[in-house]
Amino acid sequence: MAVLLFLLLLSVSVISADEGAYIGVNIGSALSAMPSPTQVVTLLKSQNIRHVRLYDADAALLAALANTGIRVIISVPNEQLLAIGSSNATAAAWVARNVAAHFPAVNISAIAVGSEVLTSMPNAAPLLLPAIRFLQSALVASNLDKFVKVSTPHSSSIILDSFPPSQAFFNRSLDPILSPLLRFLQSTSSPLFLNVYPYYEYMQSNGVIPLDYALFRPLPPNKEAVDTNTLLHYTNVFDALLDAAYFAMEFLNVTNVPVVVLESGWPHKGDPSTEPDATTENADTYNSNLIRHVLNSTGTPKHPGIPVPTYIYELYDEDQRPGSLSEKSWGLFDSTGLPAYPLHLAGSGLLLANDTTNQTFCVAREGADPKMLQAALDWACGPGKVNCSVLMQGQACSEPDDVQAHASYAFNAYYHGMGMRSSTCYFSGVAAITTTDPSHDTCRFAGSGGKNGTSLLNNTTLAPSANSTADQSSTTRTTVFTEAPFLQVLVLLTSATLQLL
């Protein structure tokens, strides 16, 4: 029974190859109330985030990511660089402990060695390439090199004279390291990891860079920046910095190393006197425009249509980070999983659907196992107290008469009835939040304004889980209740499995 149950659970999260453009997120842990690994993964699933970068190789979080299909970049922290760059055996042990022990259950796609080592730890720079080569050798010895790439994240500040892009070049003092590093990336088909922060470019320009140019806002043709050498027009800082990186690599005779933006974002809060443009409006504008730009495979003026995978900095606000208020305020969510601000991505589907202003819906995940969906639907319409009368034959939402459609209606009613908390759109991984209104014909889903959304639950009392009691406080009942879908679905799935044996 246990094996069959495992296979059923695994079937909803098959690892598949990813191609083209995608958006990922960075997951930092400098929080005073860091969510548990299970809570982190629940949030990722509810937002359909399929790519993440960790700043280390935390075993507990990797265990929680197992069998989810989420692609993971793990990192060698800067403080471990000395040991790994000095010893092939240490590198081999690191790969055995942090990669081989978890792969393939955890879909590890790359190792990020250090963080901006060339600019933040110049004294350690000579050890960077040896560390990368030692790690690559360990991956080869473990037959993992075809699945896991090795690279290192760079600050865009290593690019000098970044505009016009055609004249850009890497800091010449770094050539002894960058030239062989780029050749290594080329030989292993690995990407150049680049951190791109138009916010800092704008802040440090002393008014030279217009805010609209940093935020991807539309510009009239006479306001676009033009590279006089190539006559290419630039409408945003992000593309200009990427093309500067491409031209800088060409200067070192490297033309076929792809770029992955490992960090980019905009802070949503800052000191009004010194950081006036760190606002929720600007963060929403930048990240929403960035996501559209990347997912549309717009590419850059130099390489139009060439996807540039990008990881947003970051998933959570990190209140324990040192520095200014803005340094603590880059997150898309707070530690409880509530959006720090709503991204306005109407029509973007399942990705980062964190708008809680009645513009999101909870639906059955495409490809979810029908038995899992049926178990979750039974829970929602039973213990979950969703009013499912409109799903009965002849009623407004009876058609299409299949478990996917009916589960979507029930999941969404429960999600809206519980205040649209991301944790209430999970159902053991078969549900996801979307910005696309699933209403159809006469069937109006909760949140779309139709009358079917006016009576979400059969009564206003929260449905307690099996181990809660009538005299619990409302706060306690809410906390217990948000975890109930997973527990109830697992019980129902186990029951269904027993019937198959």
Image: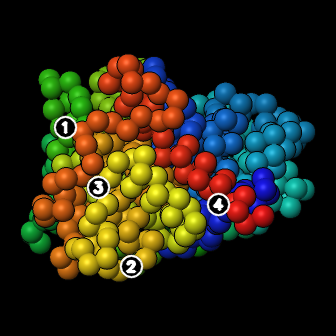
- Badge 3 crowding class, 10 Å Cα cut-off, few under 14, some 14 to 19, many 20 or more, is some
Which type of secondary structure does the marked residue at label 1 adopt? loop
Residues under numbered marks 1 and 2 in contact, where contact means CB atoms less than 8 Å apart: no
Q: According to the image, label 4 marks what residue?
A: 496
Residue 410 location (% of width, % of height)? 35, 59
Mark 1 vs mark 4: give the one in front.
4
Alpha carbons under labels 3 and 1: distance apart:
40 Å
- Badge 2 crowding class, 10 Å Cα cut-off, few under 14, some 14 to 19, many 20 or more, is few
The amino acid type of the residue labelled 4 equals: Ala
Q: Nearer the viewer, residue 423 or 156?
A: 423
Q: Quadrant of residue 109?
A: bottom right
Alpha carbons under labels 1 and 2: distance apart:
46 Å
The amino acid type of the residue labelled 3 equals: Asn
Alpha carbons under labels 4 and 2: distance apart:
21 Å
Q: According to the image, label 1 marks what residue?
A: 279
Residue 397 location (% of width, % of height)? 27, 72
